[in-house]
Image (tube, coloured by chain):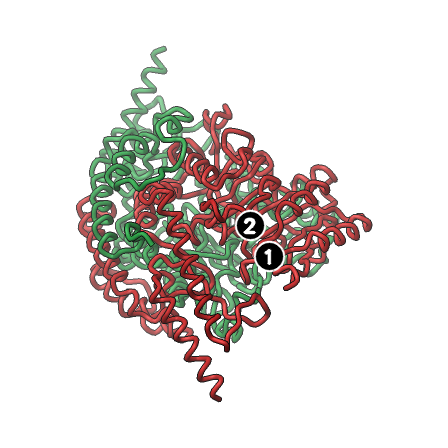
Chain colours: A red, B green
Amino acid sequence: MDNELKPMDAEQLRERAHKMVDFIADYYKNIEDFPVLSQVEPGYLRNLLPESAPHNPESLQSVLDDVQKKIFPGVTHWQSPNYFAYYPSNSSIAGFLGEMLSAAFNVIGFSWVTSPAATELEMIVLDWLAKLLKLPDDFLSSGKGGGVIQGTASEAVLVVLLAARDRALRRFGKDYLKKLVVYASDQTHSALQKACQIGGIHPENCRWLKADISTNYALSPNVLSEELSRDTARGLIPFFLCATVGTTSSTAVDPLPELGSIAKRHEMWFHVDAAYAGSACVCPEYRQYIDGVEEADSFNMNLHKWFLTNFDCSVLWVKDRHALIRSLSTNPEYLKNKASEAELVVDYKDWQIPLGRRFRSLKVWLVLRLYGTENLQKYIRNHIRLAERFEALVREDPRFEVLSGKYILRFAVGAPLTEEKHINSAWKLLQDAASTLLAI
Amino acid sequence: MDNELKPMDAEQLRERAHKMVDFIADYYKNIEDFPVLSQVEPGYLRNLLPESAPHNPESLQSVLDDVQKKIFPGVTHWQSPNYFAYYPSNSSIAGFLGEMLSAAFNVIGFSWVTSPAATELEMIVLDWLAKLLKLPDDFLSSGKGGGVIQGTASEAVLVVLLAARDRALRRFGKDYLKKLVVYASDQTHSALQKACQIGGIHPENCRWLKADISTNYALSPNVLSEELSRDTARGLIPFFLCATVGTTSSTAVDPLPELGSIAKRHEMWFHVDAAYAGSACVCPEYRQYIDGVEEADSFNMNLHKWFLTNFDCSVLWVKDRHALIRSLSTNPEYLKNKASEAELVVDYKDWQIPLGRRFRSLKVWLVLRLYGTENLQKYIRNHIRLAERFEALVREDPRFEVLSGKYILRFAVGAPLTEEKHINSAWKLLQDAASTLLAI
């Protein structure tokens, strides 16, 4: 082989990766200089790059120059302290170091044997987190349940929906698919609708129940009960209820205890989606928002939103791991091995959609160890304080009103670099816009 | 906020990431010193780590010490030059740098507007690759088709199966789900079976057609045709055919041209899974193995297997992107934006299972640019030469036989660091084992 290409030469890696570290550190140093939202027009990049891949190797410097000149303008800077869109998507030094380590091992941890540490560290850090969140013991790996890292909340809700669907079909017979009904408020994330499309739940059996200002956009147990009565009277089969703690549009919190007991009465799978707000529950004073999680069959939150863990890292706990495994396992000859056959180990391939999986627990472990739980709580509290500061600014100006209504300005605080000055200048911007509008 | 926690301080990031680079470079320097397969017992890690997350922050050094002492023993070293299991899972310096950059931006590129460069670079590098593989123009983004990076081949086959399912159900009516039939050889990767489970295809409608030594484990068009006749006579609806180029067990190659024309005749979706072997087709002399891909509706290969791109990076091309989008799109209020509404852009969220997605095209771009296509071809050729060297060694020893039969030793060459000496010593090991066995 041509000796020029040494794709994993340790010293070449050292030299080039050091260069990349400096490039990245400089990016963070100057991140506030960029407009948060990319200003390019659709198709901007096509003309800046060649029509085909280069025949000969190029230098790292020329690639980095292109990143600066051609890629940066097309980036929406989610890590900017002035980013208040969608939801936070936290990067952190610890999370970043975890990504580096995981990319370095580059193991494909589908079964325990393919890298025991990948599976075992995941079980351990998810137990740590479950304890930090004071989740019921049923979610710990020592019992019949356990936690698993999914890529996204979309995958988390999909896998539990499939487990619930198949449990119901085993009970009633597979021709009953068209009778299965899903319940959630109309504030629920579209990931649930997508999961239903994928799992073949009939669209007319998806109950997106109206939630309005009268309940602060939370799902009303009465509305749910009425709908359930109608459906069961018609011979339909309720099988899945999704509650949200912190909806996407207005961070509404569904009443878990009441919904949980309704779910139990109807033998529905009860899933709690706390993708965005769940992180706050590591603080004792906010833990109340998931009171009632004891009744849930599954619970999900995204560490990549507000817990300083780089994307992707969505953590899911279930009480009955065998329900997941029954839906998602396959057992081909070429994946068989002694440890799995003896049922001594967890094979996470059977808890998720893909076969392959990265060593994602490393970044969670690094975040927890390098920051410690006390600092993580302080981090959450600081963002809440900043959001309160913004609320106070809004209230001081009679032209604005704080509400969770139909036409609103959504302001999501939670970027790692955000300080009070960024809140103040965002508010200044909004005030200036209001002044301009009202002067017209 | 406590000033101690600076989760994205540029200088702290610089210092710690440099330290991590050296740790990783040292790992690669010494990678041959580790046993390839982890030697730990199930549950080994539980006793080595505390019962809960630390309250106070710990130093990076203490974490790295733990990685060395507690994690390394539990790692199966997929990047070792002595790794010949499953399939190659290539890391490379370029791929690693791409992972770093992507983790640094930490953008969530679900829609074009969330980072235009993430979407546009993906379209461009997938067009580059399509040209390199001489895929038909229908797969280029300029027409009705296009490419997309999925996490894994499992997700790739799932999304096209769903598109095909929904296309058939739109045509026949949604009550026809139980009549839909999938066809593939019994050598097909279990990902297809899993996709069928997820998509609600009835298990008795999955035809895993017997492929044996008479066709070198390729799917026989005659066997397929007979099965199709039987099924259509019974009123069933054939809707999906999956062919494999390089099966997992024996790298068998299904006859694409014949299968493609059968698929067309029966109006089935024709998917070609070249997850493992596809990379070889960038060399003109191996391109013949995907002759017939012109007939395919979709084509998939894993750059994270044998193309020096860190996991995860599975590339999928489709001829009709709207078939995917119809199955996988949702359009909630909070994701609406001008560019999407005007249909000026691609929103990859509608081509995949999850909503969120990483900026994965960066690593593909870096691999192509830092190595160049000529070197990548040489890289593939070298592995094939090494595999031939191994075959020659086996043939020289009368106690072994080269075959693709029932009880075999599978030897997968393709780790980035593998040289001839590693092939030789692996062979020595096998010979010694044979000697011991035959002496009993």
User: What residue is rendered at 60% in x and 36% in y?
Assistant: A323
> Is A174 drawn above or below residue B99 in the view shown?
above
Foreground pick, A62 / B425 = A62
Residue B139 visible from this viewpoint: no
CA distance separating discs 1 and 2: 9 Å
Residue extending farthest to the bottom is: A440
User: What residue is rendered at 51% in x and 43% in y?
Assistant: A316
Q: Residues within 10 Å of mark 1 (few under 14, many from 20)?
A: many
**B182 left or right of A66 in image:** right
Of labels 1 and 2, earlier in sequence is: 1
Q: How many marks?
A: 2
> Is label 1 in contact with label 2 (beta carbons under 8 Å)?
yes
Q: Chain of mark 1?
A: A
Percent coordinates x, y for residue A303 in the rendering: 43, 49
Foreground pick, A167 / B348 = A167
The quadrant in which residue A383 appears is: bottom left
Q: Amino acid at mark 2?
A: Asp
Percent coordinates x, y for residue B112 in the rendering: 45, 67
Residue assigned mark 1:
A188
Percent coordinates x, y for residue A123 in the rendering: 44, 35
- Looking at the rendered structure, which numbered label has been put on residue B315? none
> Is B418 drawn above or below residue A251 in the view shown?
above
- Disc 2, SS: strand
- Disc 1, SS: loop
Residue assigned mark 2:
A273
Q: Amino acid at mark 1?
A: Thr
Residue extending farthest to the top is: B440
Q: Chain of mark 2?
A: A
